[in-house]
Image (spheres, helix red, strand yellow):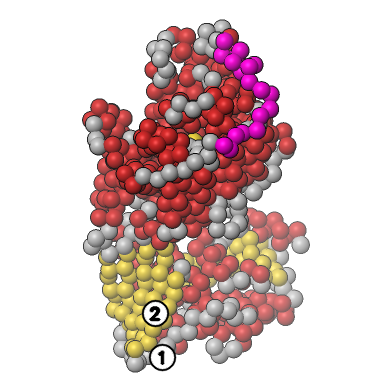
Amino acid sequence: MVLSEEAVGDIIVVVIDGRLDTHTADRFCDRLAELLRSGPPCVMIEASRLSYVSSAGFRALLITAKLAAEMGSRLAVCGLTAPIRRVVELGGFHEVIETFASREEAMAKLSAG
Amino acid sequence: MTRKPANLQYGVDDVPPASIIFVNALQFVAVLAGFLVFPLIMTREAHVSPAVADSVLSWSMIILAIGTTLQALPKGPVGSGYLAPSVMTAVYVSPSLEAVRLGGLALMGGMTAFGGLAEAAMSRSLHRLRSLLPPELAGVVILLVAVSNGMVGYRYLLTSGAAEPADVRHWTVALITLLVTMALSVWGKGIVRASCALLGMIVGYLAAIPAGLLRYHEFQQLAALPAVQLPRVNYFAWSFDAVLIVPFLIAALANTLKAVALLTAAEKFADADWVRPDLKRIGGGVLADGLTTALSGAFCVFGANVSASSVGLSEATGVASRVVAYAISAIFVVLAFIPGVVRFFTLMPAAVIGATFIFTSCAIVKGGIETIASRMLDARRTLVVGLAILTGLAVEAFPVFFQAVPTSIEPLVDSPLVLGTFVGFALNAAFRIGARRRAVLTIDPHAIDFDAIRSFMEGRGGLWGARRDVITRATFAAQQLVEVIAENCRPRGPIALSGSFDEFDLAVEARYTGDPLELPERRPAPDEIRDSEDGVRLLAGFLLRHNADRASTTRRGENCIVHFQFHH
């Protein structure tokens, strides 16, 4: 898994490239926690290059979402591919974490507040 | 809830405005009423009085009303929930003629009831026949329905089917009807598009008058009929003859296959995300169809079936609302008591019938082709599709040959649809022998290569010609399964991951020595996933169970087997 970040206004965009599973979940949690501790208003995870998420990966997302709420930051995910969106909906995670179909839609909604 | 395709103005569950409901229903009634010529022919063969003949026609309309409503029922064991009106069916012409000649309307009624009950019995086993009706074969059957219907249309168009040969007046009226209907379907909007076939038929009737295809004395006969009349019941009688069992059973089988094909087409037209036939729902539709025919027999009326023209009309006009079915039934019930109107529909010129049939067949052709093309075809499937279509076309190309067969199997070779479908079913069943394919990948749980698992599943999927979306689900299952076994089930030794495929189901299985894996029904709560030691394991089991169509775990001593099945 490769994580890359960029700041777009007040929003930190984190692009995940690869797998989010039992081997990469801890690294993901650690890096997102580091970013959230700097107090950004919003962190958006861009998932269009995310190829696979396992149950360990979903746990990492839930831990990150809880930390974001505690830090007063807004956390969102965008660009989920159809197979991964299907598993997200199967697990009910779209009810817990804000999701958007595309980066453009996410940026428009998140910038509007 | 299904997603409505973009070309449908009104989906199955929509309620159109009253004007559209009424005009659309009237349109269907006009198309369906032309087939009342079949019971009319039977009354002539039986040499019954004009009063009895009118009663047969009236009861026919009441039967069509009941059948159309039964078919549209959205809940319960009877009905498919679709707008798929009933019509007097050509499938029963041959055996019914024989029955009438042997024992009059009584024998036709008794044997038709028998045929209807046979079809109702077949409907209860349909969902178990899923492996015998893969989507590409359903597409072939839909295409053959269109060919059958289209050829009937061309027969009326080119030869008029009447005592007088077709001539330039006939073809002119047919061309006018067809062009008007096509123009309104393509360029019309709203109610005009929704009623394009009715408007085309009206223009056809009007054009037929100056062309001399409709004569004054035919209208005079209508004026002689009473305005309102209760249909008689004093001619009801039933009998049974074992010599007619085979022809009526073949007709029942043909009716069943035709109903399955047409309800599949109706299902596909109404659902943008259609993947495969819902055989349980279609079984309810076939049951409705069988019960309607059984009722036809009980009322000494001709056999009925789902109307191919109506399914095509629904697609062509963009109106698939089941509310229209109830309106059709109401109109039929009212008309059943007005003999003049009934007789007027049976006067429809052959030119207008032919043009309407050809128009409605086009939409069904499209449905058949799209369904066939939705699957990758390997050598077996190519032969099933090709031979079924070619054999069906052979019935039209070589009629003299097929007319010479024994009478008992005449219904089987009477139409492209029936024979082509029979060939497709038989070949498909035969080709299932030895069709299962299986491959195994051995995995070290301490050094999992997830890319190798993904390549294994995708490679097999390509080799087997499986559907992309099913392989994606199976690949997720394979990776998640291996991961959760390695992390939570303390496997001792390698994990044997296997995939198997028999064209209708794809199975993923893992065998290992270790602790059993739980596949919970209940979704763990977010805080359970996040904070509990068992959270990841329970979530993995839940996702695996619900990602597949069927899931099971088996334990034999220390050996565990986890099995997932994906319907293809």
Residue B254 in the image: state x and y as whole percent: 38, 44
The image quadrant of residue B445 is bottom left
Kindly identify the residue that appears in the image at 65 percent across and 33 percent down.
B230
* Residues indicated by labels 2 and 1 sit on the same polypeptide chain: yes
Q: In this view, does B235 lie above or below A95?
A: above
Kindly identify the residue that appears in the image at 71 percent across and 70 percent down.
A74
The image quadrant of residue B503 is bottom left
Label 1: element kind: loop
Q: Mark 2 lies on which chain?
A: B
Residue closest to the eye, A57 or B319: B319
What type is the residue that disc 2 sits on?
Val
Magenta residues, start to end: B217-234
Residue B199 in the image: state x and y as whole percent: 61, 23
Q: Examine the structure image and report whether residue B147 is included in the region drawn in magenta.
A: no
Kindly identify the residue that appears in the image at 28 percent across and 45 percent down.
B423
Q: Can residue B555 be seen in this view?
A: yes
Residue B562, numbered circle: 2
What type is the residue that disc 1 sits on?
Asp
Residue B515, numbered circle: 1
The image quadrant of residue B233 is top right
Residue closest to the eye, B263 or B441: B263
Q: Mark 1 lies on which chain?
A: B
Q: How crowded is mark 1: few (under 14 residues within 10 Å), some or many (20 or more)?
A: some
Q: Examine the structure image and report whether residue B226 is included in the region drawn in magenta.
A: yes
Q: Say which label, 2 or 1, has the lower sequence index.
A: 1
